[in-house]
Amino acid sequence: MNIFTKVAVTGLALSLSSFASAAISGSTDFRVTLPEVLVLYHWDDAVLNLTEVVTTAANDSDLREISDATTRTGTAVLGAATASINTNVDTTSNTALATNVAVTLQNAWAVRNLSSAKGVSLTLTNPNASLKNVVDPKSVIKTSLATLSSGALTGSTITIPSGFTPVLGDIKFNLDLSAANNAGEYNTRGLTTAALEADNGTDTFLLTLSGL
């Protein structure tokens, strides 16, 4: 055999051997398309049960007695026929005599805003502020000063930032018990039955997303 032919065959064998042992790699570009999403989660029903007074002082004999430890002082002339100590009763503090209660509905709403719209906002209103007693409709509890709260975001209207992670928040309001003259349930309808879908117009609070 010609020596040049032997060299050519040997070179071909080496070339095939090198190709068979070479590493081959490839890559894939993975992409996800998200649609525009604007979702409002909210509570449909909320009940606050006001329970009996809790005994706190050592000399309280039962649940309905609250000891006021503040010393009251008065001044009278020695030998005077009458003397009195006049101090106004505190009906605004956290006692059984308080008529206004600050209420927080924790994590009562959430918004997921993945929208191209600018200035998406959430607004809270209190269209039906009076809760009527189910026995006597003249006996009412009033809600007022309703606001939204989510971290540094507070107010009756807040701007919802864009992002897939939902913005979660509370509803805060005041409960005025000064005109509540009957025990039992209070709601906007004055009925003992649970609210139906058709009763949405009587709901206490309304959450509205805007800027879509």
Image: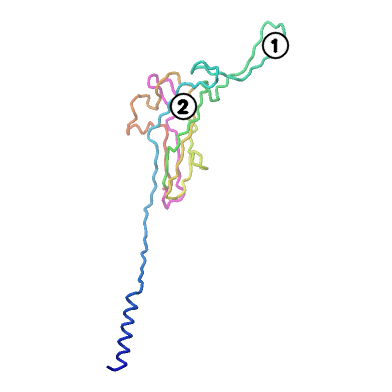
Q: Is residue 132 left or right of residue 79?
A: left
Q: Amino acid at mark 1?
A: Ala
Q: Is residue 35 above or below residue 20?
A: above
Instruction: Name the secondary structure under disc 2.
Output: strand
- Magenta stretch containing residue 125, yes or no? yes
Q: Is residue 88 above or below residue 47?
A: above
Q: Is residue 114 left or right of residue 55?
A: left
The percent coordinates of residue 52 (x first, y second) are 46, 21
User: Which residue, given by chain and number where applicable, does mark 2 sit on?
Assistant: 142
Q: Amino acid at mark 2?
A: Lys
Looking at this view, is 51 or 123 the one in front?
Answer: 51
The colour scheme is rainbow
| Disc 2: CA contacts within 10 A as few (<14), some (14-19) or many (>=20) | some
Q: Is residue 40 above or below residue 189?
A: below
Residue furthest to the bottom in view is: 2
User: Which residue, given by chain and number where applicable, does mark 1 sit on?
Assistant: 76
Give the mark toward the camera: 2 or 1: 1
Q: Which residues are magenta?
A: 113-140
Residue 30 numbered tag = none
